[in-house]
Image (cartoon, grey):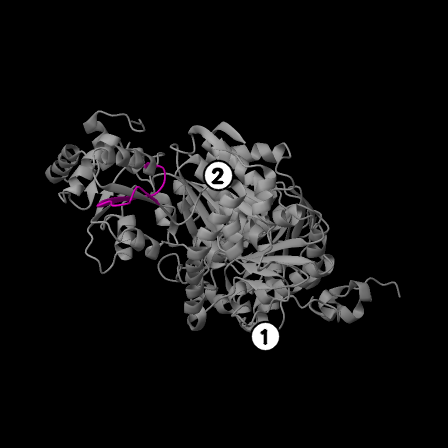
Amino acid sequence: MLKQVEGSQAVAEAIALCRPEVICAYPITPQTHIVEGLSKLARTGELGNCQYINVESEFAAMSACIGASAAGARTYTATSSQGLLFMAEAVYNAAGLGLPIVMTVGNRAIGAPINIWNDHSDSMAMADAGWIQLHAESNQEAVDLHIQAFRLAEQLSVPVMVCEDGFILTHAYERVDVPDPDQVDRYLPAFEPVQMLDPEEPITMGAMVGPEAFMEVRYLAHHKQLQAIDVIPELSAEFETVFGRESGGLIKPYRTEGAETVVIALGSVIGSIKDVVDELRDDDVAIGAIKVVSFRPFPLAQLRDALADAERVVVVEKDLALGLGGIVASNVRMALRGLRTPVYTVIAGLGGRPITKQSLHRVFAQAGADEIDDPHFLDLDLAVVDRELARAREKRRSGPIAENILRDMGLVGGKLG
Amino acid sequence: MTQRVKFYQTGTFTVGNRLLDADSRTVQATLDRSNSLTSGHRACQGCGEALGARYAMDTAMRAAGNKVVAVNATGCLEVFSTPYPESSWQIPWVHSLFGNAPAVATGVAAALRAKGRTDVRVLAQGGDGGTVDIGFGCLSGMFERNDDVLYLCYDNEAYMNTGVQRSGSTPATARTATTPAVGAHPGNTFGQGKNMPLIAMAHDIPYVATASVADLHDLEAKVTRAMEISGARYLHVHVPCPLGWGSNPCDTVKLARLAVESGLFPLFQAEHGAVTDVTPIRRKVPVEAYLRPQRRFAHLFRKPPDTESLAAIQAIADRNIRKFDLLGAGGG
C-alpha cells in the first residue's frame, strides 16, 4: 500500500510483516523510531505472538537475539553508531554461531567527538564481522531489503545487517509502498532453523575450537558469504516477481554505458550522485554511477565487469580509515586488481556534513581531468585545520582538538548544517 | 522408627543417602538421573564447580521433566566441558560470550515463550567473574525484567580459567595473580568486592539463595525450590577451587563446609527481597580453620602471623553471623 510515511515507521511495518518472533530493543539515535514503531505494533497485537524485549544495552540486545535465534525464533534488532560498537563482541559471535538474525543499522558517525549525524563509520567498523551487509538507497529500498534480508539470512543461516542512512532515510517522510501481508508471506516462508536448542534433540552450540579446526570453521563462514553472491541476485529477482518492483541485488549501475568516469557509492548519497550524473550527461560528460547494495559480500567480479570500460573510478564514501584513506575505495581497488584504472577516493559527509550537488560537480570535474588528490576530503576547511595545527605547535598544552575547533569557528557543537 | 535423620550422624554432610527415605535421597543417587554434565570432562581434580554444576543441573532436569536449555558464560565450566567433539553436556547447551549469558538466556526464554513452549525451562550459569563482574549488567537487566531464567553462579572467588586473577568476588587478603602476596598489605584489599546475592535481592526478584558444595542436599533443595517458581531466580553456589585456592583437591568439600561454619559464606534463601530461611551454623569454627589450609592465605600465617588481618576477617564472619542470625534465635 502506497503511503507517505517516515522511513523508520515504514521499516517497522516491514519488520512486522516478516512476522518476527523476538525483537530486542534498545534506544539509540537515529534508529530509535524503528523500535518505537515496533513497540506500538507489539502492544496493539499487530506483531502477533512476537516477544518484544526492552533490554539494558546494545550488548544485551544482540546477546538476547543470539539466545532467541539459537532457540529457533525469527529475531530482529536495530541499532546505530556507538550501539553497534558496544555490541561488537556479540555481533561477531552471532555470525560465528551462524545465527540468521536481521539487524537494521541506522548509520551514524562514531565518537569522539560525539556526533549523532550520518556517516558510515559504524557499519564499516563491523564490515568484517561475518554479517551480510546491505545498504539502502531509499526508504522503499530499506523496506524491500529487510524483507529480502530475512529470506537471505535464513536460507544461508547467516546474520544480515540492513544499513540505512541515519536521519537522511530514518527520519525522512517519503512515499513508500508497504507491501501486503500475503505478498510477504508468499515470499518469506516460516523460519526453519538449521540448528536449534531443543530438549528433544540436545546439541552443544558454541563449543571451543582449537587450531586444528578453526581455519576450516572460518573458511566456511567466508564460503557462506561467497554463496550469498549467488543468492542475493536470485532473491532480488524473485522479489521482483512477487512484489512487482526491482529492489536489492549486489550492485546497481546507473547510466554507465560509455561512461569514462564511473562514480561508486553506498546508500542514500547515490541519489544526489545520480542527479549530478544526469546534469553532466546533459552536458555530454561521459559519466555514470554504480550503487553498491551488498558491501558484504563484496561483489568483486560483478564490479570488475561493470567497470571494464571505465577510464577512471571515483569512490564517494562516508567513512575514513584513519591512517589509510577510503575503505570502499580499497575494496574497489581489489575488484580492479591488475588493471590500470585509477581509483580516486572522495571522503565525504563525515558526521552529517551535507554532500551538495555543487561539491560533487566540482570533485567530478577534478577527477575527470585526473587532477584530484587521493584521498580527497570533500569540503574540508583546510584553514581551520591549519590553525589548529599551528596552535598545537605553539603550545604543548593546547587542549582538546574538537573544542578548540568549535571555539575557533565560533560554532555551537551539535548544530547541523 | 520415626527418628528424624540428621546428616551429621555420619560425620559429614556428604554421605547419608542410605539413611534416608528413597524420596529424600539426592538426585545423584537415582539411576534415572540425567547426567546433564556427564563424565569425561576435563575439570581439575577436586573441582568444586564441576560438582556444583552436576548436582544443580541434574536437579533442575528432574524438576523440569528433563526439558531444560542451558546457557553458559565463558569460563572454566565452559572450557572443561566442551573441547568439541568431547562435549559433556547431554542437554541443549549454548555458549556465547563471557559477559552475556543472562541476556542470551533472556533470548532463549523469549523464543520459547513465543513458541508456546512453556514446558521448557531456561538455566544460565557462569563463574563469579562472568557473573559479578563482566556479566553484571546483563544479569541486572535479566533480573529487573524478571525474565523466566534461573541463573547459577559458581563462585570460586577469582578468575580461575585465565590463571587465578582477582574478581569482584575475591575475598580480602586472598593472593591472586593480580593481588600478589607482596608489599605492606599482601593479597586482595579490604573493603572491596560485592555481595551478589544481596544485590540480586535488591532487584526484588522472586527467589535468591546461596548454596555450597558442602551441603549438596541443601543445594538440590534450593534448585528444586527455584524451579517451582517462575521469573528471575538467582542461586549463588560456593565452589572451592584447589588450583586457585592452593588447597588439597580432597579438601574441596571440607573447605566449603569450613566457609559455611566460620560464617564467611552464609547459607540463606530469600523471596521477593526478604530472607525467608537461614541455615544455622552447626558448629562454629574460627576463620583461621578455613583460611589456614589454603595457600592463597599463606601470607597471613607467616612468622609472626598477620593478626590484624585475621582479626579483620573474623570480624567479617562475625558480622555475617549477626546479620543473618547464623547461630539461631539471636544466639552467638
Can residue B34 be seen in this snapshot? yes
* Boundaries of the magenta span: A253-269
Q: Is residue B92 magenta?
A: no
Q: Is residue B254 above or below residue A183?
A: below
The image quarter containing residue A214 is bottom left
Q: Is residue A177 left or right of A189 when viewed as pictured?
A: left
- Nearer the viewer's eye, disc 1 or disc 2? 2
Secondary element under disc 2, as helix, strand or loop, is helix
How busy is the neighbourhood of tag 1: few (under 14 within 10 Å), some, or many (20 plus)? few
Q: Position of residue B101 (x, y in %)?
A: 54, 53
Q: Which numbered tag is attached to residue A143?
A: 2
The amino acid on which the numbered mark 1 sits, given as a three-letter code, is Gly
Q: Position of residue B98 (x, y in %)?
A: 48, 56
The image quarter containing residue A257 is top left
Q: Is residue A265 magenta?
A: yes
Can residue A60 be seen in this snapshot? no
Q: Position of residue B85 (x, y in %)?
A: 54, 72
Q: Quadrant of the C terminus of chain A?
A: top left
Q: Quadrant of the N terminus of chain A?
A: top right
Q: Is residue A182 above or below residue A409?
A: below
For disc 1, the marked residue is B40
Q: How far is disc 1 from disc 2 in space, using C-alphas?
A: 51 Å
Secondary element under disc 1, as helix, strand or loop, is loop
Instruction: Report in which chain the residue with disc 1 lies.
Output: B
| Residue displayed at 69% across by 54% down | B120
Q: Position of residue A188 (x, y in %)?
A: 57, 47
| Residue displayed at 33% across by 57% down | A301
Q: How many marks?
A: 2
